[in-house]
Every structure is written in structure tokens, then in C-alpha cells.
Image: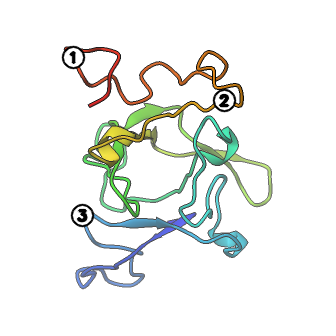
């Protein structure tokens, strides 16, 4: 595993010789902290789990890690995509979509003379929703130095437009 680590190793007693990083079927994977040793890093890793929103800073809205699944098989037909991927955070509000296969990641060997590639690479996109995070979403209040509500308007559906009978009001 590169760019992250699991919180528990699990029972690796059936392995002889070198022990895997983790032997659990449903591991909890955490991002490494900034400043992790270079031999444990990969591009877009090591942010300590702190990500920006896509709108604020797209370059810091992505986190990556690399893992080798030892008993997954040797072809892209035997490797199975992860299911029920969950982004845990201090509070609720995140949902993750299904894993999507993308072009396999390529690696340059240490002598920089050969390119190898991963058996399979996938992306999982997780999004944050304020409606999932709290039952009553925060609403925008427009204040103006001229006491005129046409100067600074709140965005449409600031409160989620939840009230079906009165579309312009919040619940």
C-alpha cells in the first residue's frame, strides 16, 4: 500500500514469509499525513484526510492511494471492484458513487527505462450534501447597506427548495 495505510492489520496467520499490510476483507484506509516518507507517497496523497471542495481548489479536492490486492487474481476479469465504499469524516453528509474503471495507472521503473502498468485502476467519487449532513439546512440571509433586497440576492434554492406546496419557502 502506498499513499495510505489501514487502521488494523487483521489476522495474517495464514501467510508464510512476508506479511501483507492488511488481511481484512473490509479495511479502513486512512490518508497519510503531509511529510510522509517519499517511499510511502504517491501523487495526490498525504493530505492528512483534509480535502478542499472542487469549487474552492480542484487540485486539492482529490486524494489517491495505491494498493496491491494479493489474492485478487491475475487478470482484469478476476479482480473485483470495491463495493460499499464509504468516506468517513467527522460528521455525516458524504455519499460515494460506484467504482468506475479508468485507464490503468502507468509506472516508470526506478532506472527510468521501462513503463509498467497496474492491472486495474478505478475512481470513486464522493460528494457532500448539506441536506444529508443536517436535517435543517442553513439558509442564506441577504443583508444590504441600502436595505434593498435586490442588491444582494440569495441563490435560488438556498434552503434546498424542500417545501413542495410553497416552492419559494423553506421548511
Residue at mark 1 to residue at mark 3: CA–CA distance: 44 Å
Question: Is residue 49 among the parts visible in the rendering?
Answer: yes
Q: How is the image coloured?
A: rainbow
For marks 2 and 3, give the CA distance.
56 Å
Could you tell me if residue 79 is visible in this image?
no
Relative depth, front residue between 161 and 34: 161
Relative to 118, residue 140 above or below: above
Select label 1 or label 3 by which is in front. 1
N-terminal of the pair, mark 2 or mark 1, is 2
Q: Which residue is mark 3?
A: 25
Query: Which of pointers 2 and 3 lies earlier in the amino acid sequence?
Result: 3
Q: Secondary structure at mark 3?
A: loop
Q: Neighbour class for label 3 at 10 Å: few (<14), some, many (≥20)?
A: few
How busy is the neighbourhood of tag 1: few (under 14 within 10 Å), some, or many (20 plus)? few
> Which residue lies most toward the left here?
165
Residue 24 horizontal/vertical position (percent): 26, 70
Secondary structure under the numbered disc 1 in the rendered image: loop
Q: Position of residue 106 (x, y in %)?
A: 63, 43
Label 2 environment density (alpha carbons within 10 Å; few <14, some 14–19, many ≥20): few
Left or right? Give the position of 32 relative to 123. Answer: right
Q: Is residue 123 above or below residue 164?
A: below
Measured from the top left, where is residue 169 in percent x and y?
32, 22
Residue tagged by mark 1? 164
Disc 2 element: loop
Q: Residue at the location (32% across, 52% down)?
A: 86
Q: Which residue is mark 2?
A: 144
Against 165, residue 11 (above or below) is below
Residue 106: numbered disc: none
Amino acid at each position: 500500500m502506498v499513499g495510505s495505510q489501514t487502521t488494523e492489520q487483521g489476522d495474517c496467520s495464514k501467510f508464510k514469509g512476508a506479511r501483507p499490510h492488511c488481511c481484512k476483507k473490509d479495511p479502513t484506509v486512512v490518508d497519510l499525513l503531509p511529510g510522509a516518507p517519499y517511499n510511502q507517497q504517491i501523487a495526490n496523497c498525504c493530505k492528512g484526510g483534509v480535502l478542499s471542495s472542487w469549487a474552492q481548489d480542484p487540485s486539492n479536492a482529490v486524494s489517491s492511494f495505491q494498493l496491491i490486492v494479493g489474492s485478487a487474481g491475475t487478470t482484469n476479469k478476476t479482480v473485483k471492484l470495491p463495493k460499499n465504499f464509504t468516506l468517513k469524516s467527522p460528521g455525516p453528509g458524504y455519499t460515494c458513487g460506484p467504482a468506475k474503471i479508468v485507464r490503468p495507472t502507468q509506472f516508470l521503473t526506478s532506472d527510468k527505462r521501462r513503463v509498467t502498468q497496474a492491472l486495474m485502476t478505478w475512481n470513486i467519487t464522493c460528494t457532500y450534501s448539506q441536506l444529508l449532513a443536517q436535517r435543517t439546512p442553513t439558509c442564506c440571509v441577504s443583508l444590504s447597506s441600502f436595505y434593498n433586497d435586490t442588491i444582494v440576492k440569495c441563490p435560488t434554492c438556498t434552503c434546498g427548495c424542500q417545501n413542495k406546496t410553497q416552492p419559494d419557502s423553506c421548511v
